[in-house]
Amino acid sequence: MIDIKKRNIPFSPPHITEKEIDEVIKAMKSGWITTGPKTKEFESRIAEYVGVEKAVCLNSATAAMELTLRILGIGPGDEVITSAYTYTASASVIEHVGAKIVLIDTAPDSFEMDYSKLADAITENTKAIIAVDIAGKMCDYDKIFNIAERKKGLFKPKSELQWLFNRIVVMSDSAHAFGAERKGMKSGQVADFTCFSFHAVKNLTTAEGGAAVWQNDFERALDDEWLYKQYMLYSLHGQSKDALAKTQIGAWEYDIVYPAYKCNMTDIMASIGLVQLDRYEGLLERRREIIEMYDRALLPLGIHSLQHFGPDYSSSGHLYLVRIPDISEEKRNEIIIKMAEVGVACNVHYKPLPMFTAYKNLGFDIKNYPNAYKQYENEVTLPLHTLLSDEDVKYVVENFKKVLSDG
């Protein structure tokens, strides 16, 4: 039964409590509001949560991905592969560093790239693969690494760091998947480099923000301290000391090692994140409950959804993606409008990159990505956030059923 009273259900508001607000006030009263002790504490907590040695906090996942490419020495003349079915940030960072974007179509009836086409896209210029953990579900990294190993003979390293890997580097755009797991490993422990987003709509937010982590092993023996310092240099103008280090007695002097960028996280942002991280396991559990409520109500109707949980994987439950069989793009758009009319904000994830002007201008054509278009044309993303009550979820479901039945 649909509630008589119309509800207003936003798509993905941040879940901020008095604890986050109090922590921000403390940071502001401390006199230290830019990168400082809270940011360093947040980095340590993220590394501990993920299960890696180091984490670096930045102002976005986009910055984390771009700086990773730059630290790897990837640039003009190189190629980087990513999915055609993603947000622009996964690909725009490749353009930023001057490398060539190579897009892969999705597999049939899948939101993940077609791994059978990945190997064929690799050339001697390929330096990295950016896999996309869409909606919070980790990709099949076993297949990606197997392909990278099979194509090892083509790899031509151009930097010392690339020599250490001696194969294509696998980077995870895990903007959606902080806290996700696959085969007993957390996101951040599997790909060579993993980049997280803490944007306002993400499961864990710092308002804006992101982080990069990397997994090390005895065979490769990456210098964690050196890598961390590279992120610090690249994110703060190439300055040899951050503001916190310069406050030490007699430590005002610094060097500019190279003209770099400005994309550091602040202590105000980190203060929000520290409280969110304290609450995170409960937030993940609530997302799982909502997903299971949606699944029980919608899957028997023949609606297809991305499966967030399985025997060997657990998603972070960031987005609830559904596909409605046998409808057109125009019909899908009508459904979203009708849902808005009853107070339910829905969305689409994602419009494939070749459909955008920027990527058309780079020579991409959606006709070459038919599976991605099929995923997009009948996809609707329902609200999924921890401010939803059970009654809100029922309201979404009942109205969605009604809109579909009304044709």
Image: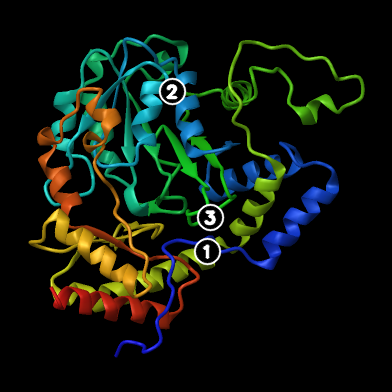
Vertically, is 366 above or below 79? below
Q: Which numbered disc flags the more N-terminal residue, 3 or 2?
A: 2
Q: Secondary structure at mark 2?
A: helix
Left or right: residue 325 versus residue 189 is left
Q: CA distance from mark 1 to mark 3?
A: 10 Å
Callout 3 secondary element: loop
Packing grade of label 1 (10 A; few <14, some 14-19, many >=20) is few
Is residue 263 visible in the rendered image? The answer is yes
Amino acid at dot 2: Leu
Kindly give the residue lying farthest to the right in the view shown: 249
Say which of 304 and 364 sits in front: 364
For the point 61% across and 12% down, the residue is 259
For the residues labelled 1 and 2, the Cα–Cα distance comes to: 31 Å
Q: Amino acid at mark 1?
A: Glu
Instruction: Tell me, yes or no, whether the two marked residues, 3 and 2, touch with CB atoms within 8 Å.
Output: no
Residue that carries the numbered disc 1 in the rendered image: 281
**Label 3 packing within 10 angstroms: few (<14), some (14-19), many (20+):** many
* Picture residue at 41% right of the left edge, 83% below the top: 391
Q: Which residue is mark 3?
A: 204
